[in-house]
Image: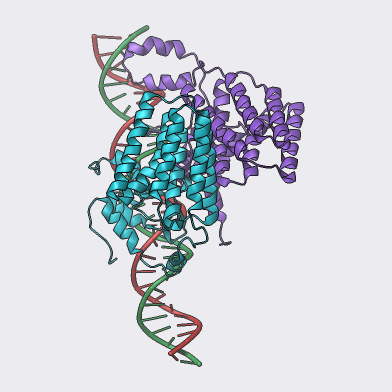
Chain colours: A purple, B cyan, C red, D green
DNA sequence: GCTTTCTGTCTTGTATGCAAGATAGTCACA
DNA sequence: TGTGACTATCTTGCATACAAGACAGAAAGC
């Protein structure tokens, strides 16, 4: 059991590297994840990379465009609404199911909130993004239920992708306030209120999104490239956009 | 199921065939899913089978024992508790988040409850198992949130595996009663009560488990002896497709 | 008879090769 | 100049070959 985990670690490593890259807002939605590039980066063959991509696809983190490549998902406005709704359902349900907050849990959350404050003071936006999402995962961890932790981690990753697409401004202070209120309610043992605050908090964040903004004008452009020249005008109108991340080679 | 030739559909077909086989209790926990056998059954190479297995693994449906094979998961007692807790969290959160039941939804649930009654009358246990799990998925579908539907489908699959391991007797009538009560509350627009009833219902089912029973006393033995699980072959063969068998190899 | 070792066979793990689709660049032509 | 076709190249899709671990059963030693 404890023997050669060297190869096994790389296997999970690809998956985890990408997820944590998203969780810390270092990987943008729509980023192209070429099998060959990842294979070279991780020093493995395409086979392993593909396996990681397949796993990430079932987790809703990446998707494949046939014969074109793997891309980090760019959630649509509908997706965004669904993700927030799912989070409200799961997080409120989770908080309502809690009965007590251990000293350990209390300390962990307190430490986390301190981290948030520090990151705000330091203006470290990437870390802040990570922490803002991680708060909710921490709460899930308190429940000790690994299934819920996994669900919320993936939903949080998608939330961050949504933020990068639709959130023009990052109201960190507001989110931090929300987290503090939730923590207070939990410490007071009022989990019903904590659940309500959590729903409220998620509503606030969702309201802060501009869901009318297109997820990625380039993607529509790409899709319509194969269409007859009837769409030429539309293409020209959108063509002054800079290319996104895929600019290697 | 006549789409066995289109390469496009086979890829999801493997995954879906296994999941629906579990949902209808035709595939038992611990069933060995040999890559070669599945490849032969579906007429594809091991590559595609492995991809399906990887996806199912991230969904918590199968697991791999290195160099020994893929197996349908045999949830431990701790897993079972976690699954039921997760279901309570998600389903209660979901019902609480609902605001109204459409006529369509009402009709669909009513039709489902009728199906349950019919299956009980017919004594069709496999179909009954399927319907008992499907009721909860139907509710999720009413929400129109595909994310939650997927989460609950996978949790339901695991629930059924748990039942097959720990549930000595199947109290179908009791479950059906629970479903009816939940539906009544929903139709009355009392979703808070529906959520409470749902938690109660899941508690009842969980209480009906004998979690002291080993997942499968034979499984440890089987694993260490690597006996060819004839139940696996029988189940796979009855799913459909050619019976070319490959038992002597 | 009992244990140990060895070997054949089965399994998955991993890399690689080739096929086929998609894209972009180029060139011919009106 | 604009437009269409052609081609070179890059991408994933999929199958296959081989490596290496795990196990069962036979053989050997006590």
Foreground pick, C17 / A193: A193
The relative height of residue B40 versus residue B151 in the rendered view (above or below) is below
Q: Is residue B26 left or right of residue B99?
A: left
Residue depicted at x 34% and y 42%: B116
Tell me what residue is drawn at x 50 percent, y 29 percent. B190
Q: Position of residue B86 (x, y in %)?
A: 53, 43
Considering only vertical position in the picture, is B131 above or below D19? above
Whether residue B140 is visible to the viewer of this picture, yes or no, is no
Q: Is residue B180 visible?
A: yes
Number of marks drawn: 0
Residue found at x 55% / y 21%:
A166
Q: Is residue A239 left or right of residue A18?
A: left
Residue B12 vs residue B213, the one in the foreground = B213
* Residue B132 picture location, percent across and down: 39, 44
Q: Position of residue A189 (x, y in %)?
A: 70, 37
Camera-side residue of B212 and B46: B212
Residue name at image x 32 percent, y 47 percent: B120
Q: Nearer the viewer, residue A185 or A158?
A: A185
Image-quadrant location for residue B136: top left
Image quadrant where one finds the N terminus of chain A: bottom right
Q: Whole-percent x and y of residue D1? A: 37, 7
């Amino acid at each position: 059991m404890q023997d050669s985990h060297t190869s096994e670690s790389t296997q999970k490593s690809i998956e985890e590297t990408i997820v944590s890259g998203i969780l810390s807002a270092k990987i943008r939605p729509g980023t192209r994840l070429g099998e060959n590039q990842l294979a070279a980066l991780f020093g493995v063959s395409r086979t392993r990379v593909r396996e990681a991509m397949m796993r990430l696809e079932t987790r809703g983190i990446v998707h494949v465009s046939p014969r074109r490549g793997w891309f980090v998902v760019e959630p649509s406005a509908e997706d965004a609404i669904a993700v927030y709704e799912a989070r409200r359902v799961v997080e409120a349900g989770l908080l309502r199911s809690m009965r007590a907050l251990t000293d350990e849990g209390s300390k962990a959350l307190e430490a986390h909130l301190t981290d948030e404050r520090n990151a705000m003071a330091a203006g470290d936006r990437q870390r802040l993004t990570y922490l803002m999402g991680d708060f909710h995962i921490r709460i899930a961890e308190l429940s000790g239920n690994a299934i819920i932790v996994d669900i919320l981690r993936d939903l949080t990753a998608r939330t961050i992708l949504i933020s990068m697409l639709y959130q023009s401004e990052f109201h960190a202070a507001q989110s931090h306030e929300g987290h503090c209120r939730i923590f207070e309610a939990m410490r007071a043992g009022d989990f019903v209120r904590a659940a309500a605050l959590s729903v409220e908090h998620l509503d606030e964040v969702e309201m802060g999104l501009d869901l009318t903004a297109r997820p990625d004008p380039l993607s529509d452009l790409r899709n319509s490239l194969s269409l007859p020249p009837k769409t030429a005008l539309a293409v020209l109108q959108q063509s002054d956009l800079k290319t996104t991340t895929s600019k290697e080679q």
